[in-house]
Image: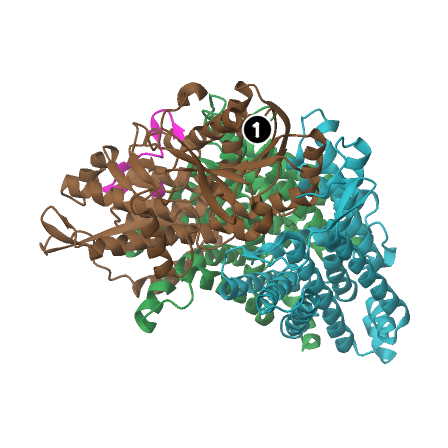
Amino acid sequence: MLLLAAPFLIESLLGRSWVRITDVALLFIMLALGLNIVVGFAGLLDLGYIAFFAVGAYCYGLLASPQFGLHWPFWALLPLGAGVAAIFGILLGAPTLRLRGDYLAIVTLGFGEIIRVLLNNLNRPVNITNGPQGITLIDPLQIDKFSLAQTHKALGLEFTPVHSYYFVFLACVLACIFISLRLENSRIGRAWIAIREDELAASAMGINTRNMKLLAFAMGATFGGVAGGLFASFQGFVSPESFHLIDSIMVLCMVVLGGMGNVAGVVIGAILLTALPEALRYIGPLQQRWLGKVIIDPADLRMLLFGLALVLMMLLRPSGIRPARRRRATSAANTPDAA
Amino acid sequence: MAPATVPLPYSAMEIFAQQIVNGLVLGSIYALVALGYTMVYGILGLINFAHGDITMVGALVSLTVAQMLAAAGLPAPLVLLLAGGAAMIVCVSLGVTIERVAYRPLRRAPRLAPLITAIGISILLQYTAALIWGKQYIAMPEIVGSARISILGAQLTGLQAAIFVLACTIMAALLWFIRSSRMGRAMRATAQNPDIAGLMGVNANTVIAFTFVLGSAIGAVAGLMVVLYYGLGHYFMGFMLGLKAFTAAVLGGIGNVAGAMLGGLLLGVIESLASGYIGDLTGGVLGSNYRDIFAFLVLVLVLVLKPSGLMGQHSGDRV
Amino acid sequence: MHKNPLPDFAVALLVATLLAACSKEAPQPVPKAAAPSEPQMLNVKIGSASPLTGPQAHIGIDIRNGVKLAIDDANAANIEIGGKKVKFEIVAEDDEANPTKATTVAQKLADSKVAAVVGHFNSGASIPASKIYSDAGIPQISPSSTNPKYTQQGFKTTFRVVAHDDQQGPTLARFAANTLKVKNVAVIDDSTAYGQGLADAFENTIKSLGAKIVAREHTTDKDTDFKAILTRIKGKKPDLIMFGGIDPQAAPMVKQMKEIAIKAKYIGGDGMQTPNFIKLAGDASEGAMASIPGLPKEQMPGGKEFLEKYKAKFNQGVELFAPMGYDAVMVFIDAMKRAGSADPAKFLPEVGKTSYQGVIGPIAFDDKGDLKDGPITIYVVKGGQWVPLETVKPNAGTPAAQK
């Protein structure tokens, strides 16, 4: 109930921009949940995760915009985006299976950059992605004449686009949470966790580590692909600028802050990291009022606090706000050494 | 303006020589920064994400000092020496402080925690620098003249030559230091097995702090080189430089000092040649816009074919 | 074993809401725009959206300063709209040059009931944000977005006070072909919407004028090492190198040209016609040329005065787009005065009919909201200064030849 009323509650309390922020937060929850499968469950450090988001977004953007004059319906495009992202996930996973830990991190980082540079440059010699100009006028989610980009009235409530998208995103997030939770306690999930904890032992137990790792990459990428498609329809515009390394790092931070492998923690991490920078914007007027002048540009302060928060979180609660159950057990055993 | 010795019809050979020179100079800067990454990784198994930003701080400090001293009319060599010295002092204290405050408490934490901390430190350094120096690109006064020499038709300024020679000297000295000195032996021992090194009387904390001192000092020198070479500094400049240097370190085999040097030089040359020739080789289908991709592609290839890097030993792969 | 996911999630949302609420309540009691109960004083908020953090912050802050200056000037001038005294107020937001943040910021500005928006800096932010302003009926003037697509989306609220890439690029090309008489040209862009758009428009026009493109190279807006591409260009022996991009790249590029002894001329767009270009490039900047929309600052009424005012207020030189940001505010105020109202719905039609003498020159919009062919001036660096070389008059040649 609270979830259903949330957008209207938020709007009356905080204004419509916060509904939009909530929408974006929901997208990031989806991304964080996807990355959680790769990093949290399977323990594969991915620093280029935003590439799957980009793939999903461009999939949708290219096939539902004037770019090629194509206007495929979203119910075909979202699964397609997810599928293509999954294929990219396997493409990334396959050659990197032998790599471990930090080597994997740098390769995934490179992969993320490669995707972005490709998107930025595939406008010549043949124009596919429209390069840095990006793709404009992307179709919103619509069935026949019913488009989420318009304001609808129902049940005495006004559903502006940000509200309608909230419900679509919410449904997707709940689906992602459901899938994540089911996966965690499934045979597959246990196999992933076994690989994360000790790959050698896992394969000795008869787990096909290769297939399991590929599956983790593909599953994680799928979440990213769906989120990307939704993002494209929500924004109506995609360009390579949205998919920088810093965005990958943001998603990773959400997963880590929340507690790797813990679904609820990851959700909290995503919400906190999306809302915090927005909330910090209000510091500027506060300085003005209390100190008479703005000493630190609020924009700088926001980044400074963000950096500081990351450091302090790791120092004080290295396993995140809500550590995964298994992780909690192991880190508790380890902490005495750390002191 | 230009000396009369410029040969007018540039032969393919001269262009090639020029590309190699370009790559080696750029690569020697990569190599210096890569050393900082690789030494810390070798000993702690930690990607010190903030190292690029320490270099940035070194660059901006030396830039400010040079600006002030050059305005006071001091002779160029003295300006450079003092600017470099100031940058080193700031970077070393910064590096040691970061290690003590942010990394040491996390030595036995889950593997990703120090990495996230390092990312946080990186952001902190960037925006503290933005507060101090502002967000504009800052110009470096032209202290060093732009006299040119010509090698095999390639144009080389005195500054470029100096950067290359100094970088090589530092690298050679570092190699010698690690091979032969007492502290170097302690570093190698700690890298191999910190517990046993501890049993043999090596103080791990001292060794690690010293590693940060060395890496930061070399980073400061690299920062000074960057502002001299490109003539400008900016609070965001450490990010891409750090990324490239890290790539270089992995290319050479992360944890391996000689490998970082080789990786840096190689990456510089690869980038130069790739962006210089890819357009002609592919008939214009691919262009210099793919320069950054080539660096990463080479990296992926090396890792897939020889995951421990060009010069890495198998023991370097830490579990 | 199976936990219901919902409670956790609800808690999470609550946390976010609370968090948001805490931060929100403090600074908000700003009076709503146009309070009807107070007939004498009218509060009008003008939004300013540009990157205030990140690598492009210096340019974004420049825009915000321009807006701030305009608002202070307007307040000092005791302007009356529809018989009421007006107090203008700036609402500056940081879009981080990020398309996603740009839409959030746009929504926020729409929420705080700004009457008009000056922004955003990059086309990548202006385009997605324009949809939100259009939905809210708030007029938007971008001081700097030059992507032609920005005004081609069919929104009535979308304007810009800068020549777009399809206007400036061809002008540069005609100058290069007709005045400099170059035959072989190398073109470099910085892989951004601005740089590449400008370079593409330049390349197309100069090809049609009979010059040969000997090399087309690309770099990025973060790079400072161009030796490799310049070396390749050197082998192709061009008479002219054209760069589509902004000063932090343009300056080291011209330096490195000199270092490897390239003797070709060097030309670029408004992105490198800045004092910082000369500061960063030093002696190497001598002889470099760049175009900028509008009349030379010294020749325009109020141009010099603007630079001095800016310097006095912010203790730094104008970076790039501050005059455009300043003029954008003035265009809004001008339209409000003519409409006799600060209600966007009322004065929006007047914005389209603008005919205003701004700091950057005469401002008028065509039916898409683009700046009508203003004059474009080519400058050259001489003795460490940008010196006007030639002003290309409006409608010189055939500006429509591109289409």
Q: Which residue does the image show at 67% across and 42% down from the upper left?
A: B292
Residue at the spot 29% in from the left edge and 56% down from the top edge: A13
Chain painted in green in the figure: A
Q: Kindly indicate which chain is depicted in cyan in the rendered structure.
A: B
Residue farthest right in this picture: B180
Q: Colour of chain C?
A: brown
Residue B313 point in image, percent of width and height: 87, 56
Tell me if residue B144 comes above or below residue B274 in the rendering. Answer: below
Residue highlighted by disc 1: A123
Question: Looking at the picture, how far across and down is residue C161, in whole percent?
Answer: 35, 38
Image check: C299 left or right of C401? left
Relative to B290, B254 lies left or right = right
Q: Residue at x 54, y 60 (%)?
A: A258
Is A160 within the magenta?
Answer: yes
| Chain at tag 1 | A
Left or right of residue A65, residue C22 in this image: left
Q: Left of A107 or right of it: where is C302?
A: left
Question: For the N terminus of chain C, which image quadrant?
Answer: bottom right
Query: What segment carries the magenta color?
Result: A142-164
Q: Amino acid at mark 1?
A: Asn
Does any portion of residue A140 appear in the rendered image? no
Q: Who is closer to the viewer here, A308 or C310?
A: C310
Say which quadrant the C terminus of chain C sits in.
Answer: top left
Instruction: Please identify the quarter of the rendering in which residue A284 is found.
Output: bottom left
State the residue in front, A314 or C142.
Answer: C142
Q: Is residue C36 magenta?
A: no
